[in-house]
């Protein structure tokens, strides 16, 4: 049944972060859709953040891969599928199944993921199946397994509203889990819930926090070990819970005492202030209900699994787990990070949370009737690409991820891809840094065109539903995989006709010979009819017994998934840094996300609105470091590590810890000359989970010597050769391209003609102040404008964008364009803070000056912050900046 009628509202789930918000999409009949939050979805109750709200702007087909390709040539599906299956057979025959690898993604739907895992691990017989979740959640998975015996998140989102204290460890939730952050902030305003943020940098998340602990990178476990000692010394542990439901407490405490015995020693080791540590300890131990949330500042480190267990230890010691408003809560990144773990997408899992014990293997083998079930774990992501580089792996199928950008040592990874005998990519987009290297490109159905399920951070399974027809010849990933399986001779085992067939099989495997031995159990969902699958309401697993309605919390009264039912305290040793800074590499390079972009920007990058918050790759530097390194605000900087180099715009930020620099992960070769930050990340991984340490690479930074900074705003992409730097972003009228020139041209006018469009040209040159400006007009409409200056001082882009929207430029407007500022009339917005209503910093500051003194006042005056709410932390920052300025003035 096609569910794609114009005007018919369809309930689905946001394809971005692990919050898993419900979305209502209403197709407009022209390939687009209007998007609204689903008020009935228990993750968001109708709210959507800036990225979710802009989903309607990412549905256009210009950048989509619309038909299969082999070596750049369009082919039929039959030809592509025959080619892939015969090459897989040949390579398997010649080099064995272990020469074939799959690299999957937490952005695949559960059904796609299930089929990929079954095909690879049960039928082709290769263990080398891993996923970008290795870079994302694997330390949490490993920590959960060590402590609980299975990969279980014991809590639910409601706990964030019911807690007395929320600790956000290594999480910039204001930008990365915005709807959960908003739920936390409502609870803070209404119930006085306290919020503590533990993060080396002062992020937007800290704007809504009561305490920020700027911990030194990698040292989290020392702080949590200190808390364990504090709890024991103050008599605040729950001896009954420890005695009845756990093991290993004395050993974990003894180790903690040895390394974190006093506030002073913790302060030295973590770089924190003793008073802040004491405040944190007393808040944590005295609050009746505490939720500790953790994300990539915990997972993506060489000590990630230990960090997870150090946090869980404190919850176990106080019996604060699986309780209403109390427990540890891993915030998952991708929309289906959890679903991938459920099907066994990681190289160290088999399927349905089962591993490689003889009993698990036998069960999976009988259930699948698998002829070639693997016997052991395969290579984890980083090692998988080493095996590609040294020729052990000869065939790779990448699905739903962009490893040439997102893996550590991304240059090395990209080079390794060229060595493959068979490289297949299933993608939505024609071109990204990974697909560009692929011999076979298969067009995958995108969000809105495909059906299936995802599981969010609170174990809640929600449906993604189709509301648009398939684009071009794109097909769902499960269909592509099943067609290859059939051609490999496994027709009987991959005869799926719909996603509900696959879901039923997946649910049945979870329930197969389970009998309460494995918490991951979807027993109730094993015989869903296609219609009831289609209508499936969001539900939290386990859901094993008839009549059950899902499980909000687990382990409140023990019953852990270990053989003896007891949770394990893990003895967490002193953290060892993977690499220390030294004279040659004096800075720690930290990496992460920005508010309005999603990963490598293949989707959010299509929305002009989302570019307006931040439009260039940047590096944040503390003012004192900037001074030492001779860097000024807005200057281009070269950042270098032992693995690679990047060129980034300098942002001087007090919130950055001295000695540490931060750069975002989103830029790639598609939109910047050298903004691909993965190229700089070192290859070290956590010894337990194999998760790469993406947050602490020793680096150096220096000013990039350029003669001219420039920006070109144009309706078509400008072709300019030999630039020292470029970065391009989408705008409502076309493109903004930031550039830099190693030297100025001898003749600006002649040179600018090489890339400016044809039309009426006006220009302005001032050699004495090293300025050159040129604009092209056509019948009163601005076609392109370019500004060059020897200093990184360029006109306000928000204001210029408004000029592009007009078709009747007056003489005055033309003068303002060349002046680079409004001469009269139009106000200059400055940086856009509220993307929903396009409200800029200048207007917000003006409103504050004229009397707005709360977020609500600004909302009433300008509407800023009143839709998705993602900018509220920044509104707070502008308000507090204004207060401190006026206090300074009063002094
Ligand atoms: N806007 C946006 N939201 C997203 C995504 C996106 O691309 N864009 N991606 C989604 C995905 S897949 C993920 S995994 C999540 C990630 O969500 P988060 O984990 O919240 O995001 P990051 O920015 O990667 O890192 C979080 C913080 O860890 C801090 N950190 C670094 N080192 C340490 C340390 O040693 N200790 C501590 N305590 N903190 C440290 C960093 O300074 C950073 O502020 O976001 C999800 N949501
Ligand atoms: N330095 C550094 N590196 C990092 C991180 C960091 O914090 N710092 N974070 C890591 C983390 S947590 C993550 S999750 C990764 C994310 O990194 P990636 O997974 O590499 O990034 P995405 O841009 O999300 O890539 C998804 C790709 O799948 C395509 N796609 C989308 N939907 C579908 C679909 O339904 N089917 C198919 N076949 N394709 C689809 C998209 O067009 C896109 O090209 O980056 C990791 N790398
Ligand atoms: S918080 Fe934003 S990105 Fe995450 S699921 Fe909700 S709407 Fe999507
Ligand atoms: Mo992630």
Image: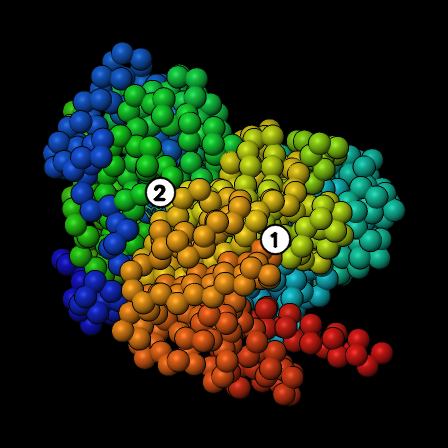
Q: Nearer the viewer, residue 426 or 680?
A: 680
Mark 1: few, some, or many residues within 10 Å (few <14, many ≥20)? many
Camera-nearest label, 2 or 1: 1
Q: Position of residue 262 (x, y in %)?
A: 87, 45
Instruction: List the residue tagged with mark 1.
Output: 635
Q: Is residue 229 left or right of residue 431?
A: right
Q: Nearer the viewer, residue 515 or 444?
A: 444
Residue at 66% x, 31% y is 578
Q: Position of residue 602 (x, y in %)?
A: 36, 50
Q: Mark 2 or mark 1: which comes first in sequence?
A: 2
Residue 66 vs 607, above or below: the answer is: above
Residue at 22% x, 22% y is 87
Residue at 40% x, 16% y is 392
Report whether the residue tagged 2 is closer than 8 Å to ligand 2.
yes
In terms of secondary structure, where does tag 1 sit?
Answer: loop
Residues at marks 2 and 1 touching, judged by CB atoms closer than 8 Å: no
Instruction: List the residue tagged with mark 2.
Output: 432
Q: Nearer the viewer, residue 735 or 138?
A: 735
In terms of secondary structure, where does tag 2 sit?
Answer: loop
Q: Is residue 214 left or right of residue 488?
A: right
Residue 627 vs 800, above or below: the answer is: above
Q: Nearer the viewer, residue 171 or 760?
A: 760
The image quadrant of residue 568 is top right
Q: Position of residue 67 (x, y in %)?
A: 18, 43
Task: Tell me how the rendering is colored.
Answer: rainbow
What quarter of the picture does the N terminus occupy?
A: bottom left
Q: Is residue 120 visible?
A: no
């Amino acid at each position: 049944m096609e569910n794609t009628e114009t005007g018919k509202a369809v309930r689905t789930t946001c394809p971005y972060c692990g919050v898993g918000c419900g979305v209502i999409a209403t197709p407009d009949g022209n390939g687009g859709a209007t998007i609204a939050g689903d008020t009935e979805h228990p993750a968001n109750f109708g709210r959507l953040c800036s990225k979710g709200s802009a989903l309607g702007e990412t549905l256009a087909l210009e950048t989509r891969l619309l038909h299969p390709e082999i070596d750049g040539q369009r082919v039929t599906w039959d030809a592509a599928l025959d080619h892939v299956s015969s090459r897989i057979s040949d390579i398997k025959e010649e080099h064995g199944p272990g020469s074939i690898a799959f690299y999957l993604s937490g952005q695949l739907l559960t059904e796609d993921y299930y089929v990929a895992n079954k095909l690879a691990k049960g039928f082709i017989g290769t263990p080398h199946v891993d996923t970008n979740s290795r870079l994302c959640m694997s330390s949490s998975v490993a920590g959960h397994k060590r402590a609980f015996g299975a990969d279980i998140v014991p809590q639910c989102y409601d706990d964030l509203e019911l807690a007395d204290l929320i600790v956000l460890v290594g999480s910039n939730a204001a930008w990365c889990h915005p709807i959960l952050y908003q739920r936390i902030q409502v609870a803070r305003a209404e119930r006085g819930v306290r919020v503590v943020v533990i993060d080396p940098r002062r992020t937007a998340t800290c704007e809504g926090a009561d305490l920020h602990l700027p911990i030194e990178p990698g040292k989290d476990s020392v702080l949590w070990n200190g808390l364990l000692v504090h709890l024991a010394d103050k008599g605040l542990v729950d001896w009954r819970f420890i005695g009845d439901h756990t093991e290993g407490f004395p050993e974990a405490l003894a180790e903690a005492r040895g390394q974190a015995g006093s506030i002073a020693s913790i302060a030295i080791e973590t770089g924190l202030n003793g008073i802040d540590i004491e405040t944190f300890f007393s808040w944590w131990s005295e609050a009746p209900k505490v939720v500790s949330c953790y994300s990539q500042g915990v997972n993506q480190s060489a000590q990630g699994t230990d960090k997870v267990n150090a946090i869980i230890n404190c919850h176990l010691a106080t019996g604060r787990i699986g309780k209403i408003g109390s427990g540890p809560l891993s915030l998952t990144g991708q929309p289906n990070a959890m679903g991938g773990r459920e099907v066994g997408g990681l190289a160290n899992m088999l399927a349905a949370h089962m591993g490689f014990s003889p009993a698990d293997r036998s069960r999976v083998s009988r259930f699948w009737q698998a002829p070639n079930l693997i016997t052991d774990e395969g290579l984890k992501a980083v090692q998988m690409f080493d095996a590609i580089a040294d020729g052990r792996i000869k065939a790779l199928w990448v699905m739903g991820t962009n490893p040439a950008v997102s893996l550590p040592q991304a240059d090395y990874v990209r080079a390794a891809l060229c060595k493959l005998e068979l490289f297949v990519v299933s993608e939505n987009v024609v071109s990204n840094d990974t697909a560009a290297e692929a011999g076979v490109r298969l067009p995958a159905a995108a969000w809105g065109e495909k059906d299936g399920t995802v599981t969010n951070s609170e174990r809640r399974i929600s449906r993604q539903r189709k509301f648009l027809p398939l684009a071009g010849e794109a097909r769902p990933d499960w269909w592509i995989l099943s067609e290859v399986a059939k051609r490999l001779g496994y027709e009987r085992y991959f005869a799926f006709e719909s996603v509900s067939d696959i879901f039923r099989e997946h649910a049945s495997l979870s329930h197969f010979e389970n009998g309460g031995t494995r918490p991951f159990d979807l027993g109730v969902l094993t015989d869903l009819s296609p219609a009831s699958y289609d209508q499936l309401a969001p539900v939290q697993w386990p859901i094993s017994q008839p009549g059950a309605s899902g499980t909000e919390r687990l382990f409140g009264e023990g019953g852990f998934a270990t053989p003896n039912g007891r949770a394990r305290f893990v003895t967490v040793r002193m953290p060892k840094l993977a690499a220390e800074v030294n004279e040659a590499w004096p800075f720690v390079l930290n990496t992460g996300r920005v508010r309005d972009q999603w990963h490598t920007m293949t989707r959010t990058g299509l929305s002009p609105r989302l570019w307006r918050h931040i439009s260039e790759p940047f590096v944040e530097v503390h003012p004192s470091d900037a001074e030492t390194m001779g860097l000024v605000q807005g200057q281009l900087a070269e950042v270098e590590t032992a693995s690679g180099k990047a060129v980034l715009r300098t942002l001087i930020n007090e919130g950055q810890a001295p000695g540490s620099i931060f750069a975002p992960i989103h830029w790639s070769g598609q939109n910047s000359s050298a903004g691909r930050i993965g190229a700089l990340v070192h290859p070290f991984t956590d010894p337990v989970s194999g998760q790469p340490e993406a947050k602490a690479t020793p680096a150096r930074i220096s000013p990039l010597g350029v003669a001219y900074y420039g920006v070109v705003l144009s309706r078509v992409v400008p072709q300019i050769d030999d630039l020292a730097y470029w970065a391009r972003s989408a705008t409502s009228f076309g493109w903004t391209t930031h550039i830099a020139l190693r030297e100025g041209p001898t003749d600006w006018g002649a040179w600018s003609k090489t890339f400016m469009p044809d039309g009426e040209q006006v220009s302005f040159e001032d050699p004495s102040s090293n300025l050159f400006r040129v604009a092209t007009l056509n019948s009163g409409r601005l076609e392109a404008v370019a500004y060059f200056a020897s200093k990184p001082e360029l006109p306000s882009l928000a204001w210029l964008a408004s000029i592009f929207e007009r078709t009747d430029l007056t003489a005055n407007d033309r003068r303002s364009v060349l002046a680079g500022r409004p001469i009269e009339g139009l106000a200059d917005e400055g940086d856009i803070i509220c993307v929903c209503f396009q409200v800029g910093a200048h207007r917000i500051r003006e409103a504050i000056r004229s009397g707005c003194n709360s977020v609500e006042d600004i909302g009433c005056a300008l509407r800023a912050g009143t839709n998705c709410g993602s900018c509220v932390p920044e509104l707070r920052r502008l308000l507090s900046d204004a207060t401190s300025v006026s206090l300074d003035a009063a002094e």
